[in-house]
């Protein structure tokens, strides 16, 4: 699964990826708060005169990259970093409020991790917007004995759906690989730790049920022969 040919041309994993902030993507759930006067007073966007008070709201980023928010209507945030989206919202809310101050975070960011052993894939929810590859692997339980620490792939969707995804190769068996492992994960990234192929162990696992069956038959034959 997710194997690549020996002569596969991997995308270049540059140091700038470790400084790349998280970018908002389709289906992200964004929780945001809006304050006036640079944070002095909270704006109650959900007030209906009933005395109810909300200090945050959630919106879902549509497949087009747009969101729909109170007062602002629809506008595009897809591909923006958290800071860029906050600044954009502050500019838009400035038409209605004095010195608006906006904070937002993505609350449903997920990364898929294949840690290197069969049947152990995990979907990890990342609370931190700027989670690194190393943190995602650690959250999934680390690299098992059967995983190749020197062959870890970071698979990332291309912004152009018609193009193949980016595939970056990391070597975490050496201390130098820590720099690469500090790369920030994006929404729906796949981290694949290539498993070690152990033919004898695999053969033994596959033959175990047959050996158990034969042993049972021998015991039964001995039992009936004694009778």
Image (cartoon, rainbow, N blue to C red):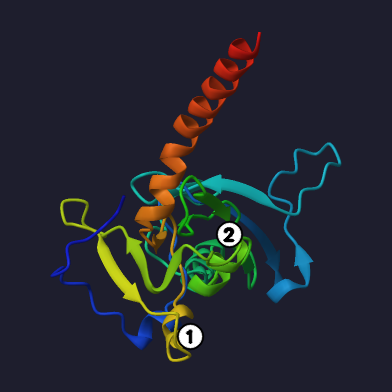
Q: Nearer the viewer, residue 65 or 54?
A: 65
Q: Nearer the viewer, residue 159 or 63?
A: 159
Look at mark 1 in the image and give the residue it sits on.
Answer: 178
**Residue under the point 40% across and 48% down:** 202
Q: Position of residue 59 (x, y in %)?
A: 55, 46
Q: Residue furthest right?
A: 51
Left or right placement of residue 100 versus residue 114 in this view = right
Q: Which mark is residue 147?
A: none
Q: Position of residue 72 (x, y in %)?
A: 50, 52
Considering the numbered disc 2 on the image, is that residue within a helix, a strand or a loop? Answer: loop
Q: Nearer the viewer, residue 70 or 96?
A: 70
Asked which quadrant contains residue 32, the reply is bottom right
Q: Mark 2 and mark 1: span between their CA atoms?
A: 17 Å
Disc tally is 2
How packed mark 1 is, by other alpha carbons closer than 10 Å (few <14, some 14-19, many 20 or more), is some
Q: Nearer the viewer, residue 64 or 139?
A: 139
Using the rendered image of the protein, determine whether residue 70 is visible from the camera's viewpoint.
no
Task: Report the quarter where the C terminus lies.
Answer: top right
Asked which quadrant contains residue 81, the reply is bottom left
Q: Residue furthest top?
A: 227
How packed mark 2 is, by other alpha carbons closer than 10 Å (few <14, some 14-19, many 20 or more), is some
**Residue under the point 27% across and 66% down:** 167
Q: Position of residue 93 (x, y in %)?
A: 56, 62
Residue 117 vs 22, above or below: the answer is: above
**Residue under the point 16% across and 51% down:** 162
Q: Position of residue 29 (x, y in %)?
A: 55, 49
Using the rendered image of the protein, determine whether residue 173 is visible from the camera's viewpoint.
yes
**Residue under the point 78% across and 66% down:** 41
Asked which quadrant contains residue 147, the reply is bottom left
Q: Point out the tag, 2 or 1, that comes first from the N-terminus.
A: 2
Look at mark 2 in the image and give the residue it sits on.
Answer: 140
């Amino acid at each position: 699964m997710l194997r690549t040919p020996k002569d596969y041309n991997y995308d270049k994993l540059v140091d700038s990826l470790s400084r790349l902030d998280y970018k908002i993507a389709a289906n992200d759930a964004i929780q945001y708060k809006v304050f006036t006067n640079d944070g002095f007073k909270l704006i109650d966007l959900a007030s209906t005169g009933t005395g109810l008070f909300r200090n945050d709201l959630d919106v879902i980023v549509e497949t087009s990259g747009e969101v729909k928010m109170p007062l602002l209507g629809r506008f595009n945030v897809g591909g923006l970093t958290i800071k860029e989206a906050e600044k954009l919202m502050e500019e838009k809310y400035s038409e209605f409020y004095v010195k608006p101050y906006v904070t937002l975070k993505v609350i449903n960011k997920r990364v898929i991790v294949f840690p290197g052993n069969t049947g152990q894939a995990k979907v990890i929810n990342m609370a931190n917007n700027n989670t690194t590859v190393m943190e995602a692997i650690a959250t999934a339980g680390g690299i098992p004995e059967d995983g190749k620490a020197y062959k870890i792939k970071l698979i990332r969707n291309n912004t152009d759906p018609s193009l193949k995804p980016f595939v970056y190769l990391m070597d975490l068996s050496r201390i130098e690989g820590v720099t690469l492992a500090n790369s920030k994960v994006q929404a729906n990234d796949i981290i694949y730790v290539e498993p070690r192929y152990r033919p004898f162990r695999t053969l033994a696992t596959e033959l175990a049920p047959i050996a158990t069956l034969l042993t049972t038959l021998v015991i039964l034959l001995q039992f009936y022969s004694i009778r």
